[in-house]
Image (tube, rainbow, N blue to C red):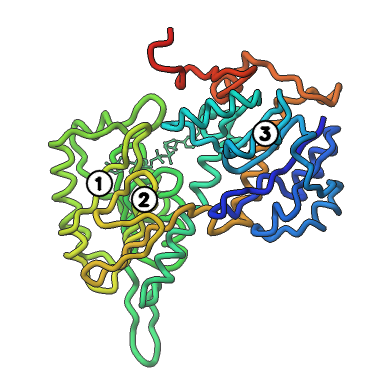
Amino acid sequence: MKIAVAAESDKGEPRVAGTPETVKKFIALGAEVAVEPGAGIRSGIPDSEYTAAGASVSADAIPGADVVLKVRRPAAAELSRYRKGALVIAVMDPYGNESALKALAGAGVTAIAMELLPRITRAQSMDVLSSQANLAGYRAVIDAAAEYGRALPMMMTAAGTVPAAKAFIMGVGVAGLQAIATARRLGAVVTATDVRPAVKEQVQSLGAKFIAVEDEEFKQAETAGGYAKEMSKEYQAKQAALVADHIKKQDIVITTALIPGRPAPRLVTRDMVASMRPGSVIVDLAVERGGNVEGARAGEVVEIDGVKIVGHLNVPGRLAASSSALYAKNLLALLEILIDKKEKKLAIDWNDEIVKATVLTRDGAVVHPNFQPKGAA
Ligand code: NAD
């Protein structure tokens, strides 16, 4: 069983899919591990650390591999280097990328999309959305603090008192909860909002104040899967009025709101931005999915009416060493259920619900039900 850790060809991707820690574990499971040169360098892992962990470092790691571990989907041009039948595991970004899926199928690889893992208890240790969102939530507050021209905690000094910053977290999933915890640790006074009622207690248990329109629709806003629904126009108007009143008193706003399969909800309008004090900072973590904030631009920090709006791309990549460490562990946890530990080889149960939910292509075809060509049965 040969496992390759690929170097990312995408310049915007500093993370790596394997670490010396997971390399050692794979070797203990009976695998040979080969790492492409420089794969870990932007996550602070030199080739020598992989070698010390027992891997070989080779430019030919991929052609011989039974399993290729990656952060992002391999580009079509790279696929000629992959062995037919190889298992390729990455964050595949499959929605709206039909031609890329066809290329994966055409190359004959079995592609597994980590972001399609079901959020069941057994898959928690493999959940890349959680591991990466958690770090993104933390980093959003650090980025806000860096852009903010004042201190976050209250400081009483001989020269006078610095007031605590007021931070407002909009959308309290995995990223939002970590943003609340981080802003609290830095001494900010924290409020938070969401449309899912289950969040209220979580917000309060982190020492923040919950602010939301808690009407009948709010009570029904969580889907069976634990996600938010798209809210009605009426609810959105009530929410906007509440937010408009609250946001003008805030120094830092972090938005993380997402709805599965839909563009991110617009929560902060241009007028709300203008109502904030100059020097305030907004971080839009939803910017890659259309943005929660009017005026936010993907990959940029813009200033509107003296308010900075931060729209960094790939926020987990801004903490590449930490996010790679957790991502690599997510991959290890998944591979552990795909390997027969006695025989020391791949033994995939194609009927396992985790496998069924994540396999995109196999034996030359796109097999995932969500990505069948239109009109197919
Ligand atoms: P997400 O990234 O899809 O969305 C982020 C947050 O935005 C959510 O809390 C959502 O309710 C909120 N939101 C959506 N529309 C909004 C609006 N109009 N106004 C304000 N907020 C809005 O969410 P996530 O971080 O993936 O978490 C979703 C759920 O999944 C949570 O309940 C989380 O606890 C749960 N979860 C379960 C597992 C597991 O069981 N393995 C793992 C991770 C997360």
Q: Position of residue 131 (x, y in %)?
A: 55, 44
Circle 1: residue type: Arg
Category of crowding for the residue at label 1, using alpha-carbon neighbours closer than 10 angstroms: few (below 14), some (14–19), many (at least 20): some
Question: Which residue corresponds to the image point at 20% horizontal and 58% vertical from the top-left?
Answer: 246
Question: Which residue corresponds to the image point at 22% horizontal and 59% vertical from the top-left?
Answer: 247
| Residue that sits furthest to the bottom in the current view | 159
Report if the CB atoms under discs 3 and 1 are less than 8 Å apart: no
Q: Position of residue 103 (x, y in %)?
A: 56, 29
Disc 3 from disc 1: Cα separation: 41 Å
Write down the quadrant of residue 304 in the picture: bottom left
Q: How many marks?
A: 3
Disc 1 from disc 2: Cα separation: 10 Å
Q: Position of residue 343 (x, y in %)?
A: 86, 22
Helix or strand or loop: what does disc 1 sit on? loop
Category of crowding for the residue at label 3, using alpha-carbon neighbours closer than 10 angstroms: few (below 14), some (14–19), many (at least 20): some
Q: Nearer the viewer, mark 3 or mark 1?
A: 3
Question: Which residue corresponds to the image point at 56% horizontal and 58% vertical from the top-left?
Answer: 319
Helix or strand or loop: what does disc 2 sit on? helix
Disc 3 from disc 2: Cα separation: 33 Å
The answer to which of marks 3 and 2 sits earlier in the sequence is 3
Question: Which residue corresponds to the image point at 80% horizontal and 52% vertical from the top-left?
Answer: 50
Q: Position of residue 356 (x, y in %)?
A: 57, 19
The residue that mark 1 highlights is: 266
Q: Residue 122's mark?
A: none
Write down the quadrant of residue 352 in the picture: top right
**Which of 339 and 36 lies nearest the eye of the viewer?**
36
Q: Residue 287's mark?
A: 2
The answer to which of marks 1 and 2 sits earlier in the sequence is 1
